[in-house]
Image (spheres, rainbow, N blue to C red):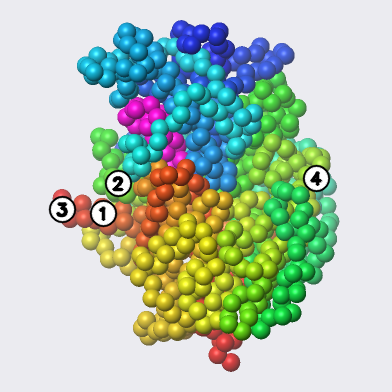
Amino acid sequence: MEFDATVSRRDVLKGSGALVVAVVAPRALSQAPAGDGQQGPFWRELSPAQLDTYLAIDEQGLVTAYFGKMDMGQGVDLSIAQIVAEELHMALDDVAVVMGDTALTVNQGGASGSTGLEQGAKPLRNAAAEARRVLSELGARHLGLLMSQVGSQGGAVYALDDPTQRVSYGELLGGQHFDVKLEWNGRFGNTLDARGRETPKPSSIYETVGKPFQRRDLPGIVMGTRDYIVDVRLPGMLHGRVVRPPVAGSVPANFDSDSIAHIPGARVVHEGDYLGVVAEREWDAIKAARELDVTWTDVDAPFPEMASLYDHIREAPVVRESAGGGRAADVAPDLESFDAALARANRVIEAEYEFPFQSHASMAPACAVCDFRGDHAILWTGSQKPHYAAQGVAQLLGLPVENVRGIWVPGPGSYGRNDAGDAAMDAALMSKAAGRPVRVQGMRDEGSGWDPKGPASIHHVRASFDAAGNVTAYCFRSKGFSAGDTESNESNPSHTYAGMLTGWPDASVQRFNNPGDRYEFPNKVQYWQTIAPLLGRASPLRTAHLRDPLGPQIHFASESFVDEMAHAVNTDPIEFRLRYLEEQRDADVLRAAAERYAWQPRVAATREIRSGDVATGRGVAYTRRNNSVVAVIAEVDVNLRTGRVWPRRFVVAADQGIVVNPLWLRRTLEGNVIHGMSRTLHEEVRFSRERVTSIDWLSYPILEMADAPEEIDIVLVNRPELPPYGAGEPSTRTITPAIANAIFDATGVRLRRAPFTAERMLEALEAAAT
Amino acid sequence: MALITLSVDGESHTFDAEPDMPLLYALRDHLALKNPRFGCGLAQCGACTVLMDGQPIRSCVMPVAAVTGELTTLGGLAVNGTPHVVQQAFIDEQVPFCGYCVSGWVLYAVALLERDPAPSDEAIRAAFAGLKCRCGAHSAILRAVNRAAGELQRA
């Protein structure tokens, strides 16, 4: 994969006030960088208030949309293309999407919080609508007609009373660029929005949005021609490897460079407490990292025994407590009215749930390439947030942010803030030290053992009922490690492994979250407490966002407990939920799932035997995350002899607002089900007192084909009157509780600690039998 | 160092390398091929899979000097630009998410259908034991293999 490092289109973006300025080279993909490197900026900032920032049309009339987020394999860019094509009345094939390059796209926050369409599509849709207006105006002028006398179709403007009179977008604008101001909301990141004078089309006349188009990058992937981050090769590029300590928290006291002198070109990179090696060939870098003789500082073992993790959480002092959002000011939980209601109650139930540390465990350890050239640098990264990663690299290298360009190249999967955010800094640090471009890739143990983790937590829930079985009070309390040891925004080196070891100050934050549901329980309290990390700096158990951050652990507890509440009052679990869900969208989704499953109301725990040793049950879970509503029903087999838990069938009902691409919405939901299954059945980061011991696929097992369900049946509750809502993550959180509830239905045994391994299931069955 | 000769996707390559270096690094670093890819280096995931005389091997643990047969990579499956029936099925079923792991799944499916053109669900699942996909494409992979098997039977 060869790159032209001088790519920039910024020079053509300076407007002169005219509607459209005739400038040759529309996207200027051959333009030199803006600065001479002496004063900077090296790459000029794109303006979010310019139509041309989002759209370009070439001589053939082909449109390129510049998208400041990116797709992590769920077809977001395809949906963006559909939305742009829709507004411009064009064929989808004539719309390309460029994403993830900081020199070509504005910072729309990267892949983040399932906002790709919910937030990210807004400025693109508005820009395309405005472009349609501008092109219609130009077309009308060209045809000698009034705006009201023309329409647009198939990438052309035509006369309404004589469609043979037409002029294509390419003829109107090809070789020029839009110079049209947009009204920008002044924000960068996820909430960036901009709009022109024209209103986007109503969904009632959509033709391209809502159709099941196929992803256009898939043939390249399957034929083996698509580039990944690991394929970036630069002239003079070295291969780097990080050298990690044998005991978490220890740092190099001394090292012997001579110990790798026999390896061709191998050199040590050492800055602060950070240690790495570089070599001309990758295999030599790997050998050098293994063979470098390092004396590490003696440190106390930083972790508790793994078996006492949950006791540690239970007993640890609370650092922060709030009933509000993790990023908002503290809100004190209203326990007074809850306690009072509890005191009057006819019946009280309570339960506690435990969820382990989990790893992103991407298909490969992260890779990044950085080319530091003194006054500027280029970063190639698989990170979800190349704009922020480039800002972070600029800080680390001591460069103005305009002098670092980030280029996203697809990586080995990304499910939040995984190790890609660390690799970007590793490559930058090593490139600066070596004076050459450096490609860094970890080994397997670094992808599972050293990536930031989803935090471990416990959740205590209580509810009370009156004599008639009505809920009178409800209290949900989470206590766990903060999700914010490592912020997902990578613009601060403090949040990276390399930054932590080279003197960047602690910038961790304390935050957690509450269940996302709309149950109208009286005297309902939800709050959370965080505790201090086990090891503050450069810890292999440092926490960060992992797909549907905090969702799986919190909803394992909240949706399991709602089932326990239903069972306590001898009520069908769906009927019980509907009793307390007052909003139409929530109830509709739950009913849609029940209908597709052919759910017959009954009280759970029938202990039905499918055949022989296999019991079978069904379980439901519902969630609302932001504006997305999901309900899942799992049908689960439990082998009473071996303990094997096998979810064989799922029904997923989802209201994601308007459906932009039903094919890839279905695929996305299906992927979330299987990803969620893996985390439910198998995943738990293991550690000793000294280190993380989940270092490969044997010590951090994930779901394999033998466990794949027979059927995942998806019901899309389409809401054409609503905008598209995020689908990338929310369904993930429903999987653990749906399976737990189905296990209870099958066996009468309630699992309150994840994951549900065969061993743990068997232990619970045996405990229940005695 | 030793003089190594490899036949990859119908072309012969000769270069100097350490005999115990894994084949993966020869393919990627010496031959500049884009796939297979490194996933674990431990033969636990399949992202590095290539075919040797039609049988899948994990190039991340195979010493380069131990290679004795003709190698085929994912990129070498197509004939005159036409995708292999398994590749076409993976496209038609829209299988990959990130796609990083795809070499293993496609090449193991090719080898499976070569020896069993009408595999049972059980046989398909067994053939894929030891392969990983972190994004959760498993259901789509099963659909794709069944589709490819159907195509082969029609052919």
Q: Position of residue A663 (x, y in %)?
A: 36, 47
Spatial CA span between label 1 and label 4: 53 Å
On the image, which quarter does residue A112 sit in?
top right
Q: Residue tagged by mark 4?
A: A506
Range of magenta residues = A73-96
Mark 1 is on which residue type? Arg
Which residue is disc 1 drawn over? B147
Report the Cα–Cα distance between label 2 and label 3: 17 Å
- Percent across and percent down for residue A346 are 66, 84
The amino acid type found where label 3 is placed reads Arg
Give the class, few, some or many, for how many residues have Cα within 10 Å of label 4's Cα (few <14, many ≥20): some
Q: Is residue A196 visible?
A: yes
Residue A383, quarter of the rendered image: top right
Host chain of mark 1: B
The kind of secondary structure element at disc 1 is: helix
In whole angstroms, how far apart are the C-alphas of marks 2 and 1? 9 Å
Q: CA distance from mark 1 to mark 3?
A: 11 Å
